[in-house]
Amino acid sequence: MFTSTHPDVEIPELSVYDYLFATLTDEDLGRVALVDPATGAETTYGALRMQIDLFAGALAARGVGLDTVVGLLCPNVPAFATVFHGILRAGATVTTINSLYTAGEIEKQLKDAGATWLVTVSPLLPQAVAAAEAVGIPHERVIVLDGAAGHPNLRELLTEGSPAPEVSFDPATHVAVLPYSSGTTGIPKGVMLSHRNLVANVAQCVPNMNLDASDRVLAVLPFFHIYGMTVLLNLALRKRASLVTMAKFDLVEFLTNIQKYQCTYLYIAPPIAVALAKHPIVDQFDISSVHTVFSGAAPLDGETAEVAGRRIHARFLQGYGMSELSPVSHAMYYGRDDEPVSSVGGMLPNTVNKLVDTETGEEITEIGPDGVTKPGELWVKGPNVMLGYLNKPDATAETLDADGFLHTGDVAVYHEGGYFSIVDRVKELIKYKGYQIAPAELEALLLSHPKVMDAAVIGVLDDDKQEIPKAFIVAAPESGLTEDEVMAFVAEQVAPHKKVRRVEFIDAIPKSTAGKILRKDLRARETAAV
């Protein structure tokens, strides 16, 4: 078993609201909490807390309370913070919904979560209303923040002046949020995260990340995803930083906002790192205000991070987590220089880990002569581990064992320096003639090719029904890159069993909103082509 190199931190027994907003000082009240680039409008911490209280009061006046689940279908706009924390302040549970979902997908989540209210914005209203009607949520319980006929809107609710309710619950057991797992390896499941889970994860992240009240954070990763929810929204608010919101990612807009608002801290997913490393337009902007870039949500190869860091003169950090871990369990420490950016850093405070051999089930503890353990499935235990999956005891039991360890399904190695590297997903390992091949390793290598803009690797069957690695490549425009060139490039740098044996050029690698490669979509594409 491995223990964190960081001393434990205090985790107060508080609600998320009290942890983030109860200790605002007079100086904090005047600080800018949120900036809307669309209008230039700024929201101070004092105004934000007042809006949260008023929204909670309006909900409570309509019967929303401890047993209520509210769906939140909203892009990154300042009002998201008001509504999200207002729902929690009222004692209700939030289930955040992907803004790109269809009506059918929204319906499934609302139904599974047991939501009886839905909050959205007018551009998403058609699919929101269709889903709400399908699950029996009436129009008066569909709040449209920017207004729509027949629905309550944010301005009306805030101007009612209803006082925030007095609510009482156990932060350790009361479900604050119900994000849904990505579904990249199965049917999406509601992840039950308590107030203590969310408070703990922010408290655990504070020592690792050099974020303070002087920082301006560009909030481009979606708040509806647990990464954006905890690391962007809640951590930034706890540290009294300013958040510059972006409703969707656009590279030019991203760079423009950094330059205009002098953003200092970026939380990103790997596709943005690739753009920062390779896209020529980056040189047209002054983004010298950025001092730190933190990548998460999916594996980022070290070379891309190093190239991007050198190009924009910023420190690149990487971390690891999953929805079931609130989400962060590992992060590079800003104060250390011996953790390679290809790693995910060390364990957060208050956690313990195990590595378990995927073949034998035996725990791996021995560090080899090269200073690294054998690969094994990563198990995590700590105050950030979820309560379980909503209404799915069997799935919970498969993931969360009796000793409180969450089985991540990811294969990792431990380095004697106290940090971890993720090798790959257990279910995504390719087995070629008995040898295990990690897609992430090949993808990192492919991304180092100057003519490759993006890449993904999956296992496919050859004519002999033998699993082999196939690469999907997004080539640089007019590069003339060929299949043979790709295969030769990889073959020169890997063991024979790791060679890419098939190549297909595509326009874009399918990815989730969190930046994870959707290998199931690539497999479906492969099946359809057979």
Image (cartoon, helix red, strand yellow):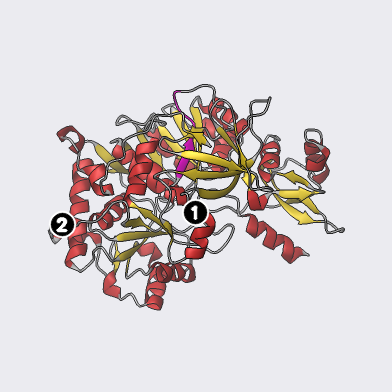
Q: Are marks 2 and 1 in contact (CB under 8 Å)?
A: no
At 64% from the left and 33% from the top, the residue drawn is: 373
- The percent position of residue 331, horizontal first and vertical second, equals 48, 35
Residue 527 forms part of the magenta stretch: no
Per the rendered image, the range of residues in magenta is 328-335
Q: Which mark is residue 166?
A: 2
- The percent position of residue 345, horizontal first and vertical second, equals 52, 32
Crowdedness near tag 2: few (<14), some (14–19) or many (≥20) residues, C-alpha within 10 Å: few
Disc 1 residue type (three-letter)? Leu
Crowdedness near tag 1: few (<14), some (14–19) or many (≥20) residues, C-alpha within 10 Å: many
Residue 332 forms part of the magenta stretch: yes
Q: Please name whichever residue, 237 or 428, is drawn nearer the observer in this view of the structure.
A: 428
- The percent position of residue 519, horizontal first and vertical second, equals 64, 54
At 43% from the left and 50% from the top, the residue drawn is: 226
Residue linked to disc 1: 400
Disc 2 residue type (three-letter)? Glu
